[in-house]
Image (cartoon, rainbow, N blue to C red):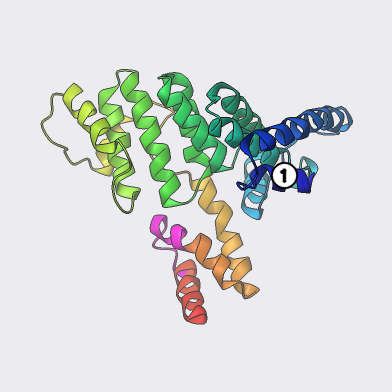
Amino acid sequence: VPICLYLMKEEKINLQRRAEIGNALVRYTDGHARKVDENAKRKPLFNFTNEYEEALYAKMANVSASEILVKYPFYQIYYTRGEIYEEMRDYTRAFGMYSKAHQWNPFSPKPILKLLEALKFDSRAADLLRLSIWYLQVTYSTHNISAALRYAGYALYLDGKFKEAYAFYYQSIVYHEGPAPARFNEEITSVLTALKKEEPYELSRSQIKKLFAYTKEKPFPSEIVFDTIRPLIIDHYSKGRYVDVLRYATHYVIFRPNDDKIVRILKASKLKLD
């Protein structure tokens, strides 16, 4: 399995050959999935790939991830096969593979982004909103949070909820770093045109809260993810893993700047790495 997975990713190999290897591995993986499912003591099963995903599951489900975790690389196999289908421009089958990858690992941003882009292209507003809100609930990085807000904003625009769409786009700008994403200016202009506004306008946090007071979908990051990464930051720092501290804490302090302990840990970790 590891060799087949490696060959599927090897761009020097002919695309058709990579597809054949992928087909064989997917057939084997589908059969293995049925056997794993039959023998499972607890369902559903997941194939998480890092400590954050396991910790987030434990936080959300209030049960150890070890009870539902499988080590066989279901997620990576289906995702990689999806990439090959996409490279071959077989987008329907690519979507199916990305969906399987997402089922095995619902926290990974890679298949989520692929699915969101497909749903956006097909103008499937309800599905796009549902998945983008899920994305917003399970990610901690500013880049991913901004992307989730942007996709949700587009879904609301498709649904004719222009004020709500603008609020999501507005929040996505707050968390975005660097140049504007592709088509962003075109999308926000369409929302403003629908609102009969000539230029962007400011929104306070209280205005946004009032706008979404009676809806489940709100344009704010999840507190659960930051509750999840806080102990990971502390644990990594205590073990001298300063690069891992930075991976989490750099984003954490943006959303929780008043957490003095984590701010001190982040500063100390940067000094250790200098």
**According to the image, label 1 marks what residue?**
5
Magenta highlight range? 250-260
Residue drawn at x 22%, y 40% as measured from the top left? 203
Residue drawn at x 61%, y 28% as measured from the top left? 99
What is the x, y in percent for residue 80?
A: 64, 39
Residue drawn at x 40%, y 41% as measured from the top left? 147
Give, as a three-letter code, the residue at label 1. Leu
Say above or below: 232 vs 242.
above
What is the x, y in percent for residue 93?
A: 60, 24
Query: Is most of the magenta stretch helix, strand or loop?
Result: helix
Residue 104 is at least partly visible in this image: no
Task: Give the quadrant of the N terminus.
Answer: top right
Any magenta on residue 105?
no
**Quadrant position of residue 150:** top left
Furthest residue toward left: 198
Say above or below: 219 vs 125.
below
Say above or below: 274 vs 75.
below
Q: Secondary structure at mark 1?
A: helix
Furthest residue toward right: 39
Residue 249 is at least partly visible in this image: yes
From the viewer's perspective, tell me whether residue 179 is left or right of residue 47: left
Q: Nearer the viewer, residue 127 or 180?
A: 180
What is the x, y in percent for residue 78?
A: 67, 35
From the viewer's perspective, tell me whether residue 35 is left or right of residue 66: right
What is the x, y in percent for residue 138?
A: 53, 42
Q: Which class describes the residues within 10 Å of circle 1: few (<14), some (14-19), or many (20+)?
A: some
